[in-house]
Amino acid sequence: MLGSLVNDWWYDAEPAEAGPACAARHLRRQRLLVTSLVGLSYCVDLLVLGLFWRGGAIPGQLPAIYAAWALGHLLVFGSVHALGLGERAANPDLTGLQMSWAIALQIGAMLWAPQIAGYFLGVIFVVFSFGAPRLPLRTALGLWLGTALALGAVLWLFPVMGAMPLQWRNSPWVRTAAAAGFASLLLRCIVLNFRAVSLHTRSLRQAASLAAEAQAARERATRDGLTGALNREGLLPLLHGALDGVRASAAPCCVAMIDIDWFKSINDDLGHLAGDRALRMLVELLHQHLRAGDRLARFGGEEFVLLMPGTCEPDALEVAERLRHLVCRHAWSQVADGLTLTVSIGVAQAHRRDSADDLLARADMALYGAKARGRNRCCVAMPLPD
């Protein structure tokens, strides 16, 4: 349980359950956990102060007062978080107030025991490492300025702060306290900085995941859900871009309107599931034989549009005939025994005056011409007058 809580704090984990109530409980638990970790840091300080007291470097009242002040911190802020009293504050974690409480304790302890002021100064660095990343920049700078002024006043008034009589420096307890104290300060700063790195790494992973999700959402929005081909929304920007190229550089561009012959009879005789399988198989077959740069989109129930940028009308007609033969010769028995499938195709080449609707309308007219001539054939749209 403790390991899970610490891991949640380390990575600033999201709540496992959804909903505002669960999110509020999760945040309250996180704030209580942070307060508990502050208490753990205080315990380390008390152990170090105990060693200094055992070596005679500080009076016994200092660890007792330090413990009382630390306990007050835990009781005040722990109660506020447990009861949810700070949730309406600008910073519900009350980070600035908690840092101010801890810094005031360190400065007071420096005045009480100036001979070990260096240790308390190190604790202030731990406090800033712990809390500053959670503060707005303006608040963090304000807290830094107040702390710097207070420390400057203390060091100005007591220039020999940190000097320790020889008999205390020779005590093994004092030497142990100094070594253990500064080792603990270094460890706490390292832990907090590694946590900052882990949070940064996690935020990068989340950003990458969100970008991938957004890309997938855009992909889904431009794809036909049944066949995987582009839909209208996916093809129209590509068609507009190709027409811009026609107008700018007279580069050729053609579209082919493809319609499955007698598709209604497949749905009526074999059922809509068989019709769906036929549509998916047709798209898969066409995709396997499209050229690089060609784009296929589903425009209606059984109607598809093939965009062929950089392709003139004779080449587009050749592509359409090749695809028509592939469909006609394909084995459709995977859909239903004895099933045959053919397509009719209308081809139109873009003109500089064409809009997307104009070009598609001419390809559609060519498609109707193919159907009127008996289906399973390709027709080319009438050229526009110059």
Image (cartoon, helix red, strand yellow):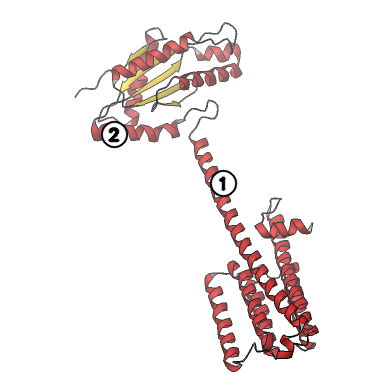
Left or right: residue 217 versus residue 82 is: left
Residue ID at (61%, 93%): 158
Which residue is the extreme one toward the top? 338
State the count of labels: 2
Q: Name which residue type carries label 1.
A: Ser
Q: Secondary structure at mark 2?
A: helix
Viewer-proximal residue, 240 or 122? Answer: 122
Count residues near mark 1 (Cα–Cα under 10 Å), then give few for <14, some for 14-19, many for 20+. few
Query: Is 5 located above or below residue 153 in the figure?
Result: above
Residue 338 placement, left or right of 22: left
Mark sitting earlier along the chain (2/1):
1
Q: Name the residue that disc number 2 marks.
A: 245
Residue carrying label 1: 209
Residue at 74% across, 85% down: 170
Image position of 66 with respect to 247: above or below: below
Quadrant position of the N terminus in the picture:
bottom right
